[in-house]
Image (cartoon, helix red, strand yellow):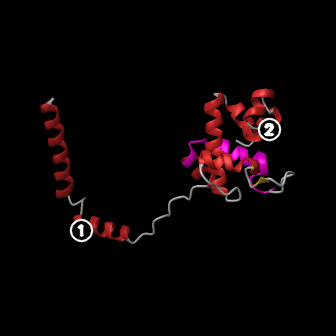
């Protein structure tokens, strides 16, 4: 094995020597190219969407958070809910604010990132409870007890999934 590695190293050194000696590798030219690269503008890293940030914070897949947003408010375009206690892009029912804040931490339902993160945490909690994606989605809209007693909110689950 050592002979094999030694042969490869020898071949690589030989190739490098040939290139350098033949003038094809001009060290000065390489240094100039590297200096010019230092002054080149660097593209800013892409900014994560609210859905991606909430997914990273909650462990919930982006598609679920995004689907729930579109099902509840057309992705934040329709924030007028029939029930005045339902707030924000994710349709968070504020009757349960104290319970959710105690379990997941304080949040503002009108703050997109906080609401998206809470939505992701709630989904993961419901998924752990039910072990079923559709039931976890239904529980976001109807609550855990409703799902236990009545089953799936079929139309709601379909609306969420059509926006994955």
Q: Earlier in the sequence, mark 2 or mark 1?
A: 1
Q: Which residue is mark 2?
A: 156
Q: Which residue is mark 1?
A: 28
Location of residue 22 with respect to 31 vertically, above or below: above
Q: Residue at x 21, y 54 (%)?
A: 19
Quarter of the picture holding the C terminus: top right
Residue 120's spot in the image, x, y percent? 63, 44
Identify the secondary structure beneath mark 2.
helix
Is residue 73 on the magenta stretch?
Answer: yes
Left-right relation of 128 to 79:
left
Q: Nearer the viewer, residue 114 or 41?
A: 114
Is residue 77 on the magenta stretch?
Answer: yes
Left-right relation of 98 to 56:
right
Residue 44's spot in the image, x, y percent? 50, 63
Q: Residue at x 32, y 70 (%)?
A: 35
Picture quadrant of residue 68: top right
Q: Nearer the viewer, residue 162 or 149?
A: 149
Left-right relation of 104 to 149:
left
Identify the secondary structure beneath mark 1.
helix
Which contiguous range is marked in magenta? 57-78
């Amino acid at each position: 094995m050592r002979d094999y590695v030694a042969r490869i190293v020898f071949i690589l050194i030989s190739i490098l020597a040939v290139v350098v000696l033949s003038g094809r590798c001009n060290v000065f030219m390489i240094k100039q190219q590297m200096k010019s690269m230092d002054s080149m503008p660097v593209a800013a890293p892409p900014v994560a969407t609210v859905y991606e940030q909430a997914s990273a914070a909650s462990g919930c897949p982006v598609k679920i958070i995004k689907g729930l947003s579109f099902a509840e408010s057309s992705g934040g375009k329709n924030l007028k809910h029939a029930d005045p206690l339902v707030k924000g892009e994710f349709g968070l029912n504020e009757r349960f604010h104290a319970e959710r804040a105690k379990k997941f931490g304080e949040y503002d339902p009108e703050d997109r990132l906080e609401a998206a993160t809470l939505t992701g945490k709630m989904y993961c909690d419901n998924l752990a409870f039910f072990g079923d994606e559709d039931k976890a989605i239904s529980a976001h809209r109807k609550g855990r007890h409703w799902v236990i007693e009545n089953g799936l909110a079929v139309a709601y689950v379909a609306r969420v999934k059509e926006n994955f």
